[in-house]
Amino acid sequence: MIYRARSGLASASWRFFASLDRPAQPGYAHVDVRQLAADVARHPSGRDWRVAPVRVAALIATVALLISACAGAPAPTLTPPADAVVITAEGTAFTTQHVTAPAMAPFTLWFDNLDHELHNVHIWDANGASIFVGETFTGPDARTALVPPLTPGTYTFKCDIHPQMTGTLVVG
Ligand SMILES: [Cu+2]
């Protein structure tokens, strides 16, 4: 069997797998790696000498298809709203340790967790009263939340998972 890449990779891959009588859909393909290894191992004996090269070519075509599919997908973009108060966590620390917010008006809090671990933003007032508890989630990811109106003053925000993660919120 001679394989020629003439049209798109997906349709070429389809024809390839269809000709091998294997399940195949554009973007989804199955290669039996153990069968492939068995074919390669049998190759020196001279039996089925065409099969291993065909399966190797099929494997290469599949990998190329998956790579092209990944390359075509746009990377997720996380952009805070223009008027949001942005708090960022990275390296098990708040990298934005001093943030400000307007007084007596609800505001959008954008929490950007760049770590592959759980963090949240928990806001406390100067008397140690809990004011706002943000969602705890694993990064890299971000969440928005609406914080209720706060009176002017200095607040502290912490991560409930990591007490050493602290920052200051000045409202005024
Ligand atoms: Cu944390």
Image (spheres, rainbow, N blue to C red):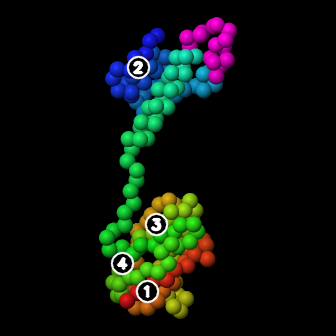
Task: Identify whether 78 is placed above or below 70.
Answer: below
Q: Position of residue 51 (x, y in %)?
A: 56, 13
Residue 80, horizontal then vertical, whole percent: 37, 67
Picture coordinates of residue 93 (x, y %)? 56, 72
Which mark is drawn over residue 15?
2
Determine whether, in the image, residue 91 is placed left or right of residue 27.
Answer: right
**What whole-number distance in Å separates the C-alpha atoms at marks 4 and 3?**
16 Å
Query: How far apart are the alpha carbons under marks 4 and 2?
Result: 56 Å
Q: Amino acid at mark 2?
A: Arg
Query: How crowded is the residue under tag 2: few (<14 C-alpha within 10 Å), some, or many (20+)?
Result: some
Residue placed under numbered mark 1 in the picture: 170
Which disc is residue 107 wearing? Answer: 4
Would you say the beta carbon of the disc 3 residue lies within 8 angstroms of ligand 1?
no
Across and down, in percent, residue 37 comes to 64, 22
Mark 3: give few (<14), some (14-19) or many (20+) Cα within 10 Å: many
Residue type marked 4: Phe
Dot 3: element: strand
